[in-house]
Image (cartoon, helix red, strand yellow):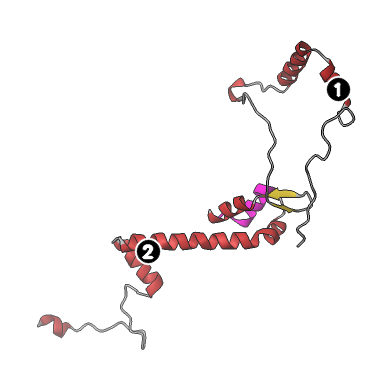
Amino acid sequence: MSTEHEDFSDSKPLTEETQSPGSKKFEELNAEEQKRIMRSISNEHEPKDNHYRVRNIKYGEKTVTGRVIGRNKVVIPEEEVAQLSQYHCTNKEMADFYGVPLQTFMDNFRDIIDKNRIITKQRLRKAQLDLALKGDRVMLIWLGKQMLGQAENPISSDNNQVLPWLDDDADK
């Protein structure tokens, strides 16, 4: 897999040549006219029910570091994929969350997903053992059955028959 990817940063600063004609006209207006235009734009998109209106939306830019995948060059942070896989999200859920095809997502993140799911299983196993060693009877019984092959029904390993009870010994 190639580590080269396209540079998405702006190579040219905003200048007279790179500025759109509409933004040039907007800057030529005085401050009062600019405010009036901005109010009219925000009123056009205002919902009918003000109860659900989000106010003071702040927009900005941020740089995302991660793997660039897919035809659309989606940047997906490895730390987020690791966290989601520790929560045991399905591969489909993670691919849909980032908006990339499932197979593309799996081809690029299989190593991170497998590693972090193993980490979660180890942490869960440790928590179970800690709980059992503190004296939780239910956890002790369950782990005995799972890890040690213990069973509630005593069965001999030779012929898988129930062990006989000796009533004679109980009467003495």
> Can you give x and y, in whole percent of width and height, for residue 122 in the image?
47, 63
Q: Residue at x 59, y 56 (%)?
A: 90
Residue type (three-letter) at the residue carrying disc 2: Leu
Going from the N terminus, do you reach mark 2 or mark 1 first? 1
Quick one: 18 or 146, which is closer to the camera? 18
Q: Quadrant of residue 167?
A: bottom left
Number of numbered callouts drawn = 2
Q: Residue furthest left?
A: 172
Q: Secondary structure at mark 2?
A: helix
Q: Is residue 99 above or below residue 37?
A: below
Q: Main secondary structure of the magenta part?
A: helix
State the residue position of label 2: 129
State the residue position of label 1: 24
Q: Secondary structure at mark 1?
A: helix
Compute the Cα span from label 2 to label 1.
68 Å
Please state the extent of the stretch shown in magenta in the rendering. 88-99
Q: Quadrant of residue 8?
A: top right
Quick one: 106 or 112, which is closer to the camera? 112
